[in-house]
Amino acid sequence: MNVGERHFRTIWLAGDGRSVEIIDQRWLPHEFRVVTLKTVDEIATAIRDMWVRGAPLIGVTAAYGVAMHMLDDASDAALDNVWSHLHETRPTAINLRWALDEMARTLKPLPIEERAAAAYARAAEIADEDVELNRAIGRHGLTLIRQIAASKKPNEPVNILTHCNAGWLATVDYGTATAPIYLAAEEGIPVHVYVDETRPRNQGAQLTAWEMAGHGVPHTLVVDNAGGHLMQHGMVDMVIVGTDRTTAQGDVCNKIGTYLKALAARDNAIPFYVALPSPTIDWTVGDGVKEIPIEERSGDEVSLVWGKTAAGDVVQVRISPDATPAANPAFDVTPARLVTGLITERGVAEASAEGLKALFPERA
Ligand SMILES: CSC[C@H]1O[C@H](OP(=O)(O)O)[C@H](O)[C@@H]1O
C-alpha cells in the first residue's frame, strides 16, 4: 500500500486467496507495518491484542476468520466453534457478534462444499458495505458541520473534539466520526480537530493524529483531561465520537472517557454527536449502563506506555511503581440523555428508541 495515499483499506485479501493482510496498528505512528494473517488463531490474536481494532474493523476481520476456517472444515460444528472462538476475543463491540451472526446466517443454509467460497464472498461484501455506510455517515455529518460553519466568521474553523480513534483505521475506510471531518475538509470548510490522546492505549495520539496529519486536517493533540477546560472557554463547537455498541434506546458505549466528555459538553451546551453504522446498534439491549459488558483489559496497558526513543527505537516504559496494581476498564456508557444525535447511514437520529425507530422502521 502506498503510505502517501490519503486513504487505505485497512484489510484486504492476500494473493493466496486465503489469508488477509492488515495494518498492525500497534506500531503506528512510528512504523507502518502490514502483516499477513493466515489462520483463525492469528485472526483471534490480532483482534484480542489490538493489532486491528475499532468495532467495524473487528467485525470484518472476524468475518474473514470464519472464511479461513471454512476452507479447513465447513461443518456445522466447525461453524459453531469458530463463532465462539472469535466472539470471545473482545466482549464489547457489537459489530463482532453482528458479523459472526451474519456469516452464520449466510453459511448455515448452504451445502458444506459451497460454504468456503460463499464465506469469502460475504466477508468481502461486509467490508465493501462498511465503506459505503461510512461514506453515508460522512454525508449526513457534513450537514451538521456546514450548519456550524455558517455561524462562524470567514475562515474561522469549526472546532471539533474527538475521542479515541473512530477513523478509517477503526473501519475498512473513511471511519465513522472522522468521515464528516474528511468530507468537510475536502469541501474546503475550515475545520480544526482537538484530538484526545485517549489513555491508556493512546488511540488518539497514535492513530487519529496520524490520520489527521495524513489528510492535512489541522489538529491539536490534547490530554484527555483538557476537554472540559476547552469547552468552558468556547474552544469547541461540537464533539463527534464513535461507538462500539449503541443500544435500542440510544445509550452509547464507547472508549473509556467518552462519558466524561459528554458531561462536559452538556454542561457547556455543546452538541455531542455519535457517528455509527447500523450494525453497531444492539437492538436487544435497552439500558446500556446495566447491560453492556465492559471489557477489562490488562493493567499493564495503564502502567506501561509505548514510545519512540531519540534513536528511533520503539520501546515500552513503566510509568508507575512495579507493585502498583492498575484497573483498566476499556469502555464506558454515555446515557442517551447526554447525546445530541446519532449520525447513521440513514441520517441523524434523536438518541432515543423513538428516534432510532423513525430511521429504522423495520425495527419498530
Ligand atoms: C468506529 S468504532 C471506533 C471505536 O473503537 C475503539 O475501541 P478500540 O480501539 O478499543 O477497538 C473506540 O471505542 C472507538 O470509538
Image (cartoon, rainbow, N blue to C red):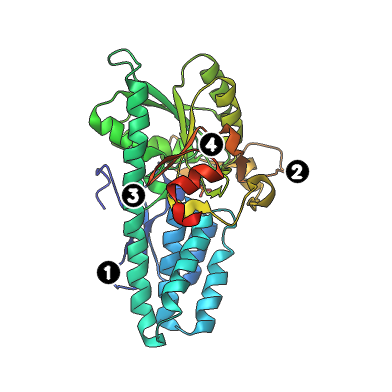
Work out whether residue 344 or residue 261 is closer to the camera in this orientation and state it: 344
Contact (CB < 8 A) between labels 3 and 4?
no
Q: Residues within 10 Å of mark 3 (few under 14, many from 20)?
A: many
Q: Distance between the Cα atoms at labels 3 and 1? A: 20 Å
2 or 4: mark nearer the eye: 4
Q: Secondary structure at mark 2?
A: loop
Mark 1: which secondary structure? Answer: loop
Left-right relation of 51 to 148: right
Number of the label disc, if any, that sits on residue 173:
3
**Mark 2 against mark 1, which lies toward the viewer?**
1
Disc 3 under 8 Å from ligand 1? The reply is no
Q: Are marks 2 and 4 in contact (CB under 8 Å)?
A: no
Question: Which residue type carries mark 2?
Answer: Ala
Q: Which mark is residue 198?
A: 4
- Label 2 vs 1, first from the N-terminus: 1
Whole-percent x and y of residue 79? 50, 78
Q: Secondary structure at mark 4?
A: loop
For the residues marked 4 and 1, what is the alpha-carbon distance in whole angstroms? 36 Å
Q: Quadrant of residue 30?
A: top left
User: Nearer the observer, disc 3 or disc 2?
Assistant: 3
Please give the count of numbered marks on the rendered protein: 4
Queried on whether the Cβ of the residue with tag 4 lies below 8 angstroms from ligand 1, the answer reads yes
**Measured from the top left, where is residue 326 in percent x and y?**
70, 43
Circle 2 Cα neighbour tier, 10 Å, few/some/many (<14 / 14–19 / ≥20): few
Tag 1 residue: 15
C-alpha separation, residue under disc 2 versus residue under disc 4: 24 Å
Cα separation between marks 3 and 2 = 41 Å
- Counting residues from the start of the chain, the first of labels 2 and 4 encountered is 4
